[in-house]
Amino acid sequence: MGVKLFSIQILFCIYSQAMKPISEFLENKQAYLSIITELELIGYPDITIKESQQIKAFLESCTIAEVNDEIKNIYTVLRRKYRLKLGDAVVAATAIYLDLPFMSADKAFNKVTELQLALYNHEE
């Protein structure tokens, strides 16, 4: 069973490319999400009722990492050092704090050397 923290981009890449619910793709894997990723998923505009239900079911199978003081400290360092967007810095700080591989399709994370990045190339 693989344990990873996932970005919003990777979840949408998986969903759109595989053409099946994310929860099926992640079966037998432990998925961690930052609170930021959860908020992005539940607040995503222009989704159908069915997609909203799929997101809810997926979130129930995930471990959601809340922001704590240590994540805030890591966030502050990352935001200043790499000039990441607020959400990206929180998600990266969460992965670093949890000491988990971070799966993303966003190349902006390449510069974060503290991150165990598994960059997904959705163009292949």
Image (cartoon, rainbow, N blue to C red):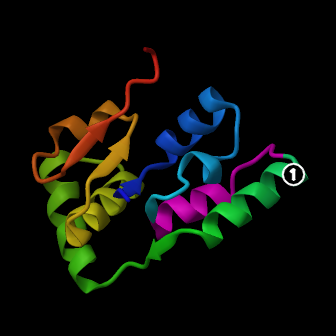
Q: Does residue 115 appear to the left or right of 87 in the view shown?
A: left
Q: Position of residue 3 (x, y in %)?
A: 35, 61
Eyeballing the image, is 65 above or below 76?
below
Q: Nearer the viewer, residue 108 or 20?
A: 20
Is 39 inside the magenta-drawn segment? Answer: yes
For residue 27, what is the image quadrant?
bottom right
85 on left or right of 78 = right
Local SS, label 1 = helix
Which quarter of the figure has residue 61?
A: bottom right
Is residue 14 shown in magenta?
Answer: no
Q: Is residue 56 left or right of residue 95?
A: right
Residue 119 lies, in percent from the top left, at: 31, 35
Question: Residue pushed farthest right?
Answer: 49
**Residue positioned 18% across, 51% down in the render:** 115
Question: Who's the residue at 53% across and 68% down the image?
Answer: 62
Residue nearer the viewer, 90 or 15: 15
**Residue 30, quarter of the rendered image:** bottom left
Residue range (magenta): 33-47
Q: Which residue is mark 1?
A: 50
Looking at the rendered structure, the kind of residue marked 1 is Lys
Q: How many marks?
A: 1
- Image quarter where the N terminus lies is bottom left
Residue found at x 14% / y 63%: 77
Between 61 and 88, the one lying in front of the other is 61
Q: Position of residue 72 (x, y in %)?
A: 26, 75
Q: Residue at x 30, y 51 (%)?
A: 102
Q: Quadrant of the C terminus?
A: top left
| 45 lies left or right of 112 | right
